[in-house]
Structure formats: C-alpha cells, structure tokens
C-alpha cells in the first residue's frame, strides 16, 4: 500500500512537472517511458588545431548557422559556439557536438578553456591560400569561434592562434527538443539540446498508426520524413553519430501537434 501511494505521488509529481513545462511558450512535453542509458560519452584525447573568431561580442552573426539552430541563444546554446571547418563539420553530422578549446604556443594566449557547441560551418575559401587566410580549407581542422568564446582563450588581436582541442560530453538540461517544420506531407524536424556526444547519425519517427519511418538527413541538424502524420502522437528514435547508441523518445508530440512548434522529450543522451 505504501508503495502504491508513493507511486501515485510520483505520478502526480510528473504531471505537475509536465504542466509546468507546457506553460513555457511553445515547448511542450509529454511524460513517457523513463530513459535507460547504458553508455556515457567520454572526452577524447587533446589534439592540435587552429582557431580564429567571427562576429563581435554580441555573437549576433552566429545566429542562423549551418546547423539550423536558428537563434542559438534562445535555443539554449548561448554564445559559446563555433563554426567548424568542413573536415570536422562532416556535412552537418558534427552539429551539436561539444568541444573544449585552449590556446597554445602564442603570446596572445590566456589560460582559459572554452567549451563550445558546434553550430555552424566555416566554409573553404579557395581564393585564399590554406596557410594564409584559407584557414577552413580542407584538410585543415579549424574552429572559427564566436568572439565571446574566443576571448576566453586568447586576446582577439591575435587573429589566429594554435589550439589544443578535445571532444567533451554535452551537458544539456532536460530532454532532446524537436522543432517541427514542413507541411502536411513533409515533416522536417530540427533536433536540439542533444546531450552526451551531442550528434545524430540516424533518426526515425512513428505515429500512433504507423510503423517506424526512417527519416533522411536534410541539412545541419534536421531530419525529414515524407509522410502524413497529422493527428497522430509522434515518437522518435535517434542514433548518436559518435557512440551509435540509440534511444527512443515515446510520444514526444501529442496528436494535436503543429508545425512551427517545439516539443521536448524526457529522454536524452549523457
Ligand atoms: C574569399 O577570399 C577572398 C580573398 O581574400 C575574399 O575577397 C572573399 O570575400 C572571400 N569569400 C568569402 C565567401 O568569404
Ligand atoms: C510560438 O509559435 C508562434 C506561432 O508558430 C510564434 O509566432 C511564436 O513566436 C512562438 N513563440 C516562441 C516563444 O517560440
């Protein structure tokens, strides 16, 4: 009986949490299967690269990057972001990955370590030499950091500095977020707030009346299904690009979901 009562209490607790989350703008959440993750993403070894910065202190120029996160500040990534050279951007599969970067071997270095999220692509510029301005040309590994992030590791006067970097787990609050675009026959989902390795290699969607439908990579951190899913509660299955771990987020969006809205799962990678 005691167990029954605490279970009941827990359900009431979850319900109130859900109501609370639902009241925040367009983000809604539906309580579902608790998350069971066997794997935890571990930092990679430190490796050499170079870093520059773009934009100004406001990081306004980091909005609307090649990952499709739109406003990186309101979407939870803050101003500690970077554009990755194509060698490490991997056609957008690196979107959402987290890195620690520190400046080395330059008089402009400060002692800080910046922790950034990959939110953008630094495209090659073949009209510039790879060692004189074309810093993002393949096969170079380069971070073009938002200025607030760069200023944590070096003086901006430096322009370009050698760095050491490593992948680190992304620490995110709450579950993965799914931002819906598209039309009645095409669901385009931007996936944000991914924890752990932070990245995605594959994704599926399931309506209450469908089997799992494989989604294809569109651009950045967006995945699409050409299907009519209106009026069905939607679940998602996501595989991490780096760890290959797969998690299921059941009933993320209720049957009355709408395009233009963002739905948050209770599950996440760690
Ligand atoms: C590429 O480099 C050239 C030469 O410096 C410059 O004029 C041009 O604006 C650059 N292109 C882009 C897209 O940044
Ligand atoms: C909520 O959605 C509406 C309509 O799609 C949009 O105009 C509004 O800006 C959104 N609000 C937030 C906080 O995202």
Image: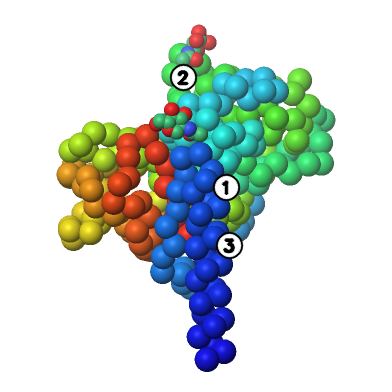
- Residue wearing tag 3: 42
Q: CA distance from mark 2 to mark 1?
A: 25 Å
Question: Of tags 2 and 1, which is closer to the observer?
Answer: 1
- Figure check: 54 above or below 16: above
State left or right for residue 231 relative to residue 69. Answer: left
Q: Counting residues from the N terminus, which is met first, the one under dot 2 or under dot 3?
A: 3
Q: Counting residues from the N terminus, which is met first, the one under dot 3 or under dot 1?
A: 3
Question: Of tags 2 and 3, which is closer to the observer?
Answer: 3
* Mark 1: few/some/many CA within 10 Å (<14, 14-19, 20+): many
Q: Please state which of residues 149 and 24 is positioned toward the viewer in this rendering.
A: 24
* Mark 3: few/some/many CA within 10 Å (<14, 14-19, 20+): few
Q: Please state which of residues 63 and 165 is positioned toward the viewer in this rendering.
A: 63
Q: Give coordinates of residue 22: x percent, y percent.
A: 49, 49
Q: In terms of secondary structure, where does tag 2 sit?
A: loop
Q: Give coordinates of residue 60: x percent, y percent.
A: 60, 22
Q: Please state which of residues 22 and 167 is positioned toward the viewer in this rendering.
A: 22
**Does ligand 1 reach within 8 Å of label 2's beta carbon?**
yes
Residue 242 showing in the rendered view: no
- Residue wearing tag 2: 125
Q: Please state which of residues 80 and 226 is positioned toward the viewer in this rendering.
A: 226
- Residue wearing tag 1: 98
State left or right for residue 246 relative to residue 60. Answer: left
Residue in the image at 40% along x and 39% along y: 261
Q: Give coordinates of residue 158: x percent, y percent.
A: 74, 23
Q: In terms of secondary structure, where does tag 1 sit?
A: strand
**Does ligand 2 reach within 8 Å of label 1's beta carbon?**
no
Q: Quadrant of residue 218?
A: top left
Q: Give coordinates of residue 236: x percent, y percent.
A: 33, 56
Q: In terms of secondary structure, where does tag 3 sit?
A: loop
């Amino acid at each position: 009986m005691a167990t029954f009562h605490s279970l009941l209490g827990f359900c009431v607790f979850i319900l109130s949490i859900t109501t609370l989350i639902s009241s925040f703008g367009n983000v809604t959440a539906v309580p579902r299967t608790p998350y069971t993750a066997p794997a935890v993403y571990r930092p990679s070894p430190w490796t050499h690269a170079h870093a520059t910065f773009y934009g100004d202190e406001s990081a306004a120029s980091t909005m609307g990057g090649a990952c499709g996160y739109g406003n990186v500040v309101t979407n939870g990534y803050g101003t500690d972001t970077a554009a990755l050279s194509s060698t490490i951007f991997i056609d957008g599969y690196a979107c959402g990955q987290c890195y620690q970067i520190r400046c080395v071997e330059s008089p402009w270095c400060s002692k800080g370590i910046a922790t950034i999220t990959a939110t953008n692509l630094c495209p090659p510029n073949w009209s510039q030499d790879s060692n004189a301005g074309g810093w993002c040309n393949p096969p170079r590994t380069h971070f073009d950091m938002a200025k607030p992030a760069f200023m944590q590791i070096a003086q901006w006067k430096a322009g370009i500095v050698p760095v050491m970097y490593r992948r680190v787990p992304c620490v995110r609050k709450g579950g993965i977020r799914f931002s819906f675009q598209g039309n009645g026959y095409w669901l385009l989902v931007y996936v944000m707030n991914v924890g752990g390795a932070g990245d995605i290699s594959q994704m599926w969607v399931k309506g209450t009346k469908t089997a799992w439908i494989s989604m294809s990579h569109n651009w950045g951190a967006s995945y699409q299904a050409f299907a009519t899913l209106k009026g069905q509660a939607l679940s998602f299955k996501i595989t991490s690009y780096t760890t290959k771990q797969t998690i299921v987020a059941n009933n993320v969006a209720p049957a009355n979901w709408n395009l233009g809205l963002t739905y948050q799962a209770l599950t996440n990678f760690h």
